[in-house]
Amino acid sequence: MGISETYTRGRELAVTRPGSVLLGLVGVVLLFDLLVSLVTGTQSLSGVGSLVWDGLMRGLVIGLAGIGLSMTYSILNFANFAHGDYITAGAFSGWATTYLIAGLGRADVGALLLVGASGSVFGGTLGIGVTGTPVAVVAGIVVAGISTVLLALLIDRTVFKPIRDEDGITLLITSVGVAFALRYLMQFVFSSSVRGTTAQPPSLSLYLVDGAVRINAHDIALVVVAGSLMLGVHLLLQLTKLGKAMRAMADNEDLAQITGIPTERVVRAVWVVGGGLTGVAGYIFILWKGTLGFNDGWLLLLLIFAAVILGGIGSIYGAIVGGLAIGLTASLSVIWIPSSFSRAAAFFVMIVLLLVKPEGLFSGRSTA
Amino acid sequence: MSVRDDLAARIPGGDTGLILSILLIVYAAYVLVGVGLGYSLRGQFNTIAVLTFYIAVFAMLALALNLHWGYTGLFNIGIVGFMAIGIYVMAFVSKPLYQPGGAAQVGGLGLPIIVGMIAGTVAAALVGLVVALPALRLRADYLAIVTIAMSEIVRFSFLSGEFEQFELFGTRVGFGGGSGLILNYTDPLTAFFEVFGLGGAYLGLVDAFGALVPNNPKPVVDSLVYGLLLLLFVAAYYWLLKRTGESPFGRVLKAIREDEDVANSLGKDTNRFKTKAFMLGCGLMGLAGVLWFMRSGAVTPNTFRPRITFFVWIALIIGGAGSNTGSVLGGAVFAALLYQGPRYLKNLIDAALPNASAPSGFGPAIAPLVSNVDPTPLLLYTIDSIRQLQLVFMGLVLIWLMHNRPEGMLGHRKETAAGIPLTASQARDKTAETDGGTTGGEADE
Amino acid sequence: MSDVPSSTGSEIDTDEPDGAAGVPDADDAESGSLDLGAGGPDVGEPYPLEVENLRKSFGGITAVDDASFSVERGSLTGLIGPNGAGKSTTFNLITGMLQPDAGSVTFDGEEITGETPHAIANRGLVRTFQIARELQEMTVLENMMLAPKFQRGEALWRSVTPGFRDDVIEQESELLERVWAVLEFFEIDHIAEEYAGNLSGGQRKLLELARALLTDPDMLLLDEPFAGVNPSLERRLLDHIHELREQGYTFLLVEHDMDLIMENCERVIVLHQGQVLTEGSPDEIQANEEVIEAYLGGNV
């Protein structure tokens, strides 16, 4: 018994403290490896720069979409597996609008509304892009946000509200049902084809010692939109009464109910804010990567979960930082491991962090 | 709740009787519809074989998941990952050695199929251990995210070029990458009969079957017999898990599900129990993966998407988590109604309307409805897309179940976690036995 | 009082530590007291539980601050203190549910600081919870059958392997007998087949105590066992506790009800702001100015 106790305690210790030590060591080794390969010329500085830029872009999308997930996770107390399909829904609604505005008179309305299902219209042919068709893009962003809000509210009213008091797992399982219904309904309507959505955007090259890092107009658009929305959420939560109420509820729902904050109203506000951000994130994600398929949101969802958990559930700054960390991990991991494992690396980072610091990086600072 | 109890009370044979009667009804329905549409005998046999196959695999998977979720409260949504490990490791071990010029790009270790099956099961259990060691201490929803992430990591790994082919013991082996892995070992069914020296007898059976299906009866007989074998596996799963549940071990698992702190404060090393239960369930999922795919000719990593996990969850929730009988029934009902049902329906409609051609997309399908109120193309498109819509339907079923019957379609099933019946009369009999029957009812008021 | 006949002592398992099995109390037969079938409490150190300089803080708030006390064998000791005095935290530290920042806990002469809850329980130091934590979806009998330590069938392979399972079944029958005797002792045998979630608050408390006893403990830590229990059931519960104490079990009791503590405990330990304010007999405590002040100041 003595031995097994010592062993258990040793294992616990190895996981808590020395775990972080080990993690730091691994980081140092990786960094050293990178330095060596830079010096020996196996990696170019500009190549690494491009990866960092790519990771940042990815991270902004994940972070922006993660804010909504983090808010619902902390306030409604469940992991919403339908969140990824809200992203896809936002993308489809927004891109249908963009196609319609950009292609009106040049192609069949039905084909435009279905975002060129089965190759009936091509985004590239319509010249879609933030420089080519700015009005269509802005309208698309707005519609993506609004329609995702409506969708989130509708699903909340019909699906989640009746079982609001159930435990988190019941809600989680239900949200899986929502996810599948939504995803395959979208496949039914928009087809399973992955379509190109944009024309080649103009880009500029930043010279970095030994080569160029290319930054295109859609990268800039992503930075501007994501950055301003994140700032907006920050102000909303800091300055408005609603933000205060949300923070109170995330901390303790019972308390919030006693002190008289109208919780259903807060819940609705959370879906409005979270849904809006999610829809826009879905839209700009597609704008940035230039292709759209019915699985896109779902494939992003696990990375978003990783980001939200990494940052600490309920913290919007955590979601943003976590998003950037996950995005950078996924992009930069190709320096050390084969690219087919970049996603796996991101999950791995999440799992490791769960072990070392299960409460997340920004724990205890709910929703603000 | 009472519906289920009444049913069980009325059906002779208790739980086994209930399972058999439900299966009987399902089969009768399928056969009757087939007869109504004038299916050939061959077609009927095929329908039955395919139905049996899916009933069996979903029943096995639901049983394994029930050990995790129903008994221990472990929220595993990485089921498909363990299945993938099962079949891939089995293929790796049992595929014949690489032959240059053969159809298969890579070879295996060339060991007997049974060794491969065991290796696949053990590998899945070991990966379960790797996941369990860190993750079982986490909150239920974190475990969920870790397990689903694990199942995706498994899929990416088998997809990756790095594992596509490599050298081991001087021979070319691998997992085939995105283009898939050809399962070019002897047909497991043939191998199975040959182990018992029954290869000839089996071929005799096939010949005899030729009287019913004259034209090439072997595939039909093969799939029927394989379905039957799978049912035996279901029985074995059921037997094993029933014993596991009805024991002090199962009692601790149930206590962990209810309140882990309590189990701990009563001196139970809950982490050990959880790890064991998790590994056992993962191993059984791995074996189910082997049995599902080992006769499919080839496997590709993208088969193992999380939707299969979702299927198993629906099956378990239909049957009612916590009950082994419920798991088998849930697997059967899911396979017959939600999984095979719509596909069968599509076949029927195709047979009834042989000349109708469905539009290629939603656009051409809905346009006639808008322009001249003609719903036919949309209807045809809907029927044609039944495989996608069936997933929509399953999602809605899941939502409905969680709203209305979270305890399962058949109501809450009570399975006692003990090796003997735990009833007051049993206990009194026991005490009476040793005390000479003097004091049994004294404290009863 | 129900008169429980002693059942035959059943040995639980071969790998049980420190000879807890067997050795029934010599006076069992005459007193007609409850025999738990595994020998009752051990007789060892005069002070089975010793707590020294225990300290625990949560993010800047020190919940337990250098607390030291000991509990005498075979006593019914009360642990009192105003709200937030650190009583529950102390319990959690002793039973391994929380790890102390400093200090030590000794049980039966061995240091158990930082051991896991199950290891501590297996040493014979067993707790109940403030809010009864019955296992809701399990019947009363299942709840009880869970408790005995080191059951053969807790090994998975033994429970499923043909041939070996017979031993498991045999032990299950023996356990059921013991369980039934304890249920009768606590007069809750009439609800044996009920789901624990359907019991009344008082019945849950009885079940929890009965369940804890089945682990064959030497000492029981009861966290507010009378909260939400009606007076007649409270009397019954107290009678049971006194009876068990006479059989040699040691009790440490956290309780809010002052009168109850003063009437029933031989010794009382007073916690205040995480420290042991004083300890002594009920009379001494009642006369202690500091205690009165602590309670008045602590808005109780």
Image (spheres, rainbow, N blue to C red):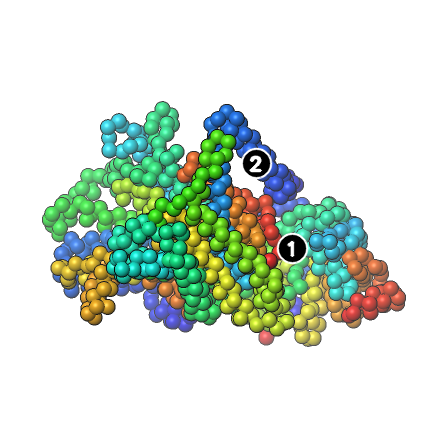
Pointer 2 and pointer 1 on the same chain: no
Q: Amino acid at mark 1?
A: Asp
Q: Which mark is residue B416?
A: none
Q: Position of residue C256 (x, y in %)?
A: 74, 68
Q: Is residue B126 left or right of residue C133?
A: left
SS at circle 1:
loop
Q: What's the chain of the residue with tag 1?
A: C
Looking at the rendered image, the disc whose residue lies closer to the viewer, 2 or 1, is 2
* Residue under label 2: A27
Q: Nearer the viewer, residue C217 or A223?
A: A223
Label 1 CA crowd tier, 10 Å (few <14, some 14–19, many 20+): many
Q: Report which quarter residue C17 is drawn in.
A: top right
Label 2 CA crowd tier, 10 Å (few <14, some 14–19, many 20+): few
* Residue under label 1: C216
Q: Residue at x 53, y 45 (%)?
A: A325
Q: Amino acid at mark 2?
A: Gly
Residue B334 shows in this picture: no
